[in-house]
Amino acid sequence: MLRRCAALLCCALALPAVADDIMLIGTMGNKGVFQINGQRKTLSSGQESGAFKVIRIEGESAVVASNGQQRTLQLGQGYVASSGNPTDNQGGTLVLQPDQLGHYSTELTINRVTLPGVIDTGATHLSLSRNQAAQMKISTQGAQTGRSQTANGIVGAWMVRVPQLQMGKITVYDVQLVVRDVDDNGPILIGTSLLNRFQMKREQDLMILSKKAY
């Protein structure tokens, strides 16, 4: 009997973590309309579905929680909620090599869309163009507006927070970024609003970024 219980416990521990791909697509009072793994579902504050729970609805945003962490989703924003123990919280390291011009590049993934980015230590924020934001399903509706300095002068911009992104294979949560009111297809500029989540060091011509443990 003890052996059987031990075997059942081992099987339970080996079960994969539950994960849901969720996106906020609408709000109605204290209810949020979510797309969960491709299916539409309406949830009230306090209700759970799979790997996440709705904490509260705030206007056109929703505060949700999964795996002990809370995030605020704006309309059109989403992330993958997991009930397992997240390995990405244990840190990680990116080792980048310069290109022929001395630039350090990596990939950025937001809402399951991946685009190239370049490290820009002189930029205050992670910055991308309006069409890149559209590709990555980043909504600027209701976002704070401002101005952004570019190589071609000052342009309008929106300040947005995304609940989750990946730089390379490392996941980072709740990152502030700037959407420039221009259409271009250059690389996303990775500024200090994202870089400050990492310890940075140089070894010869390599740039080593190690995720801070917090």
Image (spheres, rainbow, N blue to C red):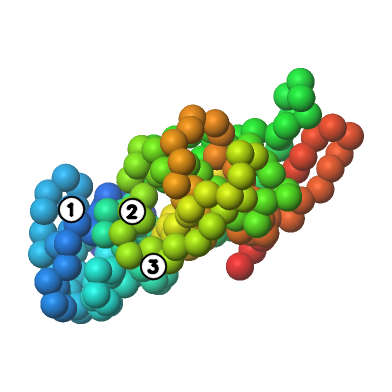
Measured in 3D between alpha carbons, the distance from the residue under mark 2 to the one under mark 1, in whole angstroms, is: 15 Å
Which residue is labeled 2 in the image? 139
The image quarter in which residue 206 lies: top right
The image quarter in which residue 8 lies: bottom left
Of pointers 2 and 1, the one earlier in the residue sequence: 1
Is label 2 in contact with label 1 (beta carbons under 8 Å)?
no
Quadrant location of the N terminus in the rendered image: bottom left
* Residue 172 seen in this snapshot: no
Quadrant location of the C terminus in the rendered image: bottom right
Secondary structure under tag 1 reads strand
Question: Camera-side residue: 87 or 115?
Answer: 115
> Tag 1: residue type?
Gln
Q: Which mark is residue 120?
A: none
Which residue is labeled 3 in the image? 71
Measured in 3D between alpha carbons, the distance from the residue under mark 3 to the one under mark 2, in whole angstroms, is: 16 Å
User: Residue 113 in the image: x percent, y percent?
Assistant: 39, 37
Which residue is labeled 1 in the image? 35
> Tag 3: residue type?
Arg
The image quarter in which residue 73 lies: bottom left
Q: Is residue 65 left or right of residue 103?
A: left
Q: Is residue 169 above or below residue 198?
A: above
Q: Residues within 10 Å of mark 2 (few under 14, many from 20)?
A: some
Question: Camera-side residue: 27 or 55?
Answer: 27
> Tag 2: residue type?
Ser
Question: Camera-side residue: 9 or 192?
Answer: 192
Measured in 3D between alpha carbons, the distance from the residue under mark 1 to the one under mark 3, in whole angstroms, is: 16 Å
Q: Which residue is painted at 26% across and 59% down in the image?
A: 75
User: Residue 172 in the image: x percent, y percent?
Assistant: 52, 55
